[in-house]
Each structure stands twice: as structure tokens, then as C-alpha cells.
Amino acid sequence: MKVTWLGQAGLMFETGGKTILVDPYLSNSVAKIEPHNQRRVPVQEKFLKVKPDVILLTHCHLDHTDPETLQHYLNEESSVLVLASYNAWQTVRKLGGLKNNYTMFDRKTRWTEGELVFEAVYAAHSDDHAVGIVMYAEGKTFYITGDTLYNELVFADLPERIDYVFLPVNGRGNNMNMADGKTFCQRIGAKAIPLHCGLFDDLDLNDFAYVNKIVPEFFKEIKL
């Protein structure tokens, strides 16, 4: 298993010969609408040339479901499984490509793809169809919370064991802050990879006080 942080909430998993992209944001689209949100870290162009097998989209905010980024992966020649929450699905399926499998992936939905299993779980966010995603791979359980606040409904959907959790801790835009993120991680007992900082702000992920964590670096492998 190789995991790379693509910045913001973007992740790339490589496992069993498959490449999975999660919420890739590799443009400056947000700044066209919100000029104060200029990206502070340049895009590494090589990641726009990746040929994903699966794309996971947790919700339909532009820094998670970005047509300008996704057009690099989805076209008339690509054959990609796209698991997208309802609002994200409505956006991404318009990008076209009849060989791509655009699948609505709302809460409680499960999809098995070879040796991989994906489950959509609740996320408390301003997109009313936002989800988190639990991925089972290589005998481990990986939980990508998507953008979410600390909310009791989240825990009701989670499996008993989670090995790794990837979560936002920026405390803005209806996301957990670092204090609530710490409590969240203590409660589920997983090794944590904090995300969603450093692209639009000057927050330092090293300030996340949860002990059992891995602090990622932009465009580098996360050593699990």
C-alpha cells in the first residue's frame, strides 16, 4: 500500500495494482470564485497524468469535486469507476465518457471492486449528501472522513476497528478543528493523518495534538 497526499483533502492510494484517487484538487479553481483562497502550493503536474482505476468523491464542494482537475482523468477514452455522493455524482457524470462508470455513492452504500471494498458513511457537512468513505484493503481498514464536524451520527456508521483515519482539522467551512479532531481520533482509536491545512491557510498540521498521528507533506508518500 502506498498513499500520497495531494494537498487539501486529496489522496492517492496504490494497492493491488490499482490506483485510487480521493477528492483530488489540482487546479486553482476555487480562487476564481473566492480570490482569497489562492492555492499556496503549486500543483505537481505529474499527478495530472495519473491513470486512476477508481475515483472517490465525498461531496460537491469545488476543492473536492473539481471539474478542472477531473477532466484530466475522465474522458471518452478512460474507463474509471467513479463513486460519488449524490451532489458530486450530479456534477461529475456531466464530464462525459461512456466507458466511465459513474455510480451514486450515498450513505450506507457498499461497492466491491476486486479485493477492495468501499462503504459510504455519514458526514456532518454543509453538503447535505456528503459522505465519509471506509475502504477495506490489504487486511486493513482505512477511514476517509471527508469534510465533517464532530457529530454523534458519524460514529453510528463506523466499523468497530479502524486502522487509519484521514480527517480535516482546519476548523473552518464546517470541518472539525484540531481540538475536536483530537477527541474524534481518541474515540475511534486509529492512527490519524490530519488534512485540509496549508493550501489556503497558514495552519501547521504539526500543531495537531493527537499523539498517534502521521503528519503528511504535500505530494509525498505518507509512511503508514
Image (spheres, rainbow, N blue to C red):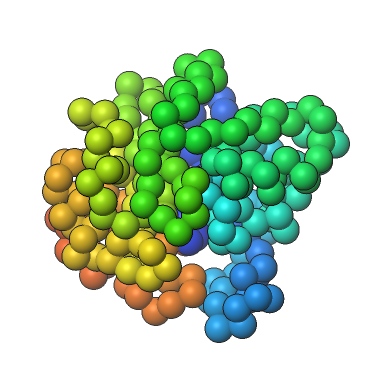
In this orientation, which residue lies closer to the viewer: 192 or 149?
A: 149
Camera sees residue 173: yes
Exactly how many numbered labels are in the figure?
A: 0
The percent position of residue 201, horizontal first and vertical second, equals 43, 77
In this orientation, which residue lies closer to the viewer: 54 or 121?
A: 121
Camera sees residue 220: no
Query: Residue at left 30%, top 61%?
Result: 176
Query: Residue at left 54%, top 20%?
Result: 113
In-image side of 27 versus 174 (left or right) = right
In-image side of 56 versus 134 (left or right) = right
The percent position of residue 213, horizontal first and vertical second, equals 23, 52
Q: Is residue 8 above or below residue 118?
A: below
**Quadrant, the C terminus:** top left
Seen from this angle, which residue lies furthest right? Answer: 76
In this orientation, which residue lies closer to the viewer: 154 or 22?
A: 154
Q: Is residue 87 above or below residue 27?
A: above
In-image side of 183 versus 79 (left or right) = left
In this orientation, which residue lies closer to the viewer: 101 or 121?
A: 121
Seen from this angle, which residue lies furthest top? Answer: 114
The percent position of residue 96, horizontal first and vertical second, equals 81, 40
Query: Residue at left 26%, top 51%?
Result: 151
- Splitting the image into 4 quarters, where does residue 104 fall? top right
Seen from this angle, which residue lies furthest front? Answer: 128
The percent position of residue 14, horizontal first and vertical second, equals 51, 35
Seen from this angle, which residue lies furthest bottom? Answer: 36
Q: Is residue 124 above or below residue 190?
A: below
**Quadrant, the N terminus:** top left
